[in-house]
Amino acid sequence: MARACRLVDDRVDGYLDLLKELFPHTGHAWIVGVTGNPGAGKSTVTDRLVELWRAQGKRVGVIAIDPTSPFSGGAILGDRIRMQRHFEDPDVFIRSLATRGALGGLSRSAVDVMRVLDAWGADVVVVETVGVGQDEMEVTRTAHSTLIVAAPGLGDDVQAAKAGILECGDVFSVNKADRDGADATMRDLELMVALGRRVVGGGQLTSVGSHSGAAMRRETGGVDSAGAWVPPIVRCIATQNQGIDETERWLEEHRKWVMDTQAGQERRHLRLREQMENEMRNALVDAAVRDIGNQLEEAIGSVSRRETDPYTACERLVAAFRKG
Ligand SMILES: Nc1nc2c(ncn2[C@@H]2O[C@H](COP(=O)(O)OP(=O)(O)O)[C@@H](O)[C@H]2O)c(=O)[nH]1
Ligand SMILES: [Mg+2]
């Protein structure tokens, strides 16, 4: 397993053949994203969740990603310590990834390693990522279910939520409820979830309580009358193992929704489409840059001298690629 992960992670010659061979053995694992600001308690929550899943006899893979600490120890070392007791368990496999500017980026490595873990026979693959940045958002979008871990006092949480994380959150945990400010964070998130549903849902607003007051004072989540998923918000103290079983139950509810309902199927279809469009976008840009050769440099020159506008220049480059 470690060798397969390294092969895939380092893109050693032949890694694509390995992935192609493994692919038929994938599709079994439930991918759970765990996202949130550094220090919110993602690793501590994950460690507790792993314990619950192991008690259910599930085989668990964990991918911990921290682009802010490329092998410098830091959070990744912390993650290892947080999850240390699972390292001896043959049915738990933990792998850390850091940013290394690899071709295709972090999200691609993560997806590849996910597939290796899936083929290994993982029932659950947890992907822990810091909730900022394009790459992390992409990783989050590959998960079936995403848990957002927020903590009081980290004021950016709600900011991050505004920046699009919210849209990805299926279950929210307000961790460190033993600290001051947990109530305020709960309220902030409840409001954000209620507002987010209006924004994200667009025209097809479903009611979780027909009056805005009811929607904002919602205590739980789950599947609403229209079949849509409403993210629940759970209060946790991970270090004392409080709220973790409830979090796990909600994640399981969400798993059933994603796997078994029409709406969940549609979401999986949409996400797979996004993934494949990304793959295509990368492949197309690579192919085009290779094919049109010098024309890109010429276009850059012409735009910087303001002889052409960038829109026309790009249209011409695309036309040249299609003709070529
Ligand atoms: N007071 C308190 N501290 C916690 C709680 N959960 C985690 N921590 C601590 O917060 C720190 C960061 O936790 P960690 O799981 O590494 O956060 P991550 O960066 O999001 O993975 C560690 O020192 C944890 O022991 C909690 O519920 N209450
Ligand atoms: Mg961590």
Image: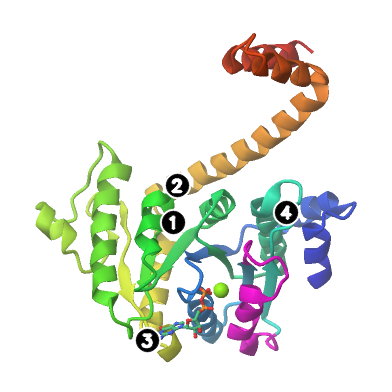
Question: Within 8 Å: ligand 2 and the Cβ of disc 4?
Answer: no
Question: Within 8 Å: ligand 1 and the Cβ of disc 1?
Answer: no
* Number of numbered callouts drawn: 4
Q: CA distance from mark 2 to mark 1?
A: 7 Å
Find disc 3 in the rendering and name its residue.
242
Q: Closer to the N terminus: mark 2 or mark 1?
A: 1
Q: Closer to the N terminus: mark 4 or mark 1?
A: 4
Find disc 2 in the rendering and name its residue.
267
Going by the numbered disc 4, the residue's amino acid type is: Phe
Mark 3 closeness class: few <14, some 14–19, many ≥20 residues within 10 Å: some
**Residues rendered magenta in the picture:** 65-89
Indicate the position of residue 237 as horizontal and vertical percent values: 38, 84
Give SS at disc 2: helix
Q: CA distance from mark 4 to mark 2?
A: 21 Å
Q: CA distance from mark 3 to mark 1?
A: 26 Å
Give SS at disc 1: helix
- Farthest front residue? 305
Find disc 1 in the rendering and name its residue.
258
Q: Is residue 245 magenta?
A: no
Give SS at disc 4: helix
Mark identifier at residue 23: 4
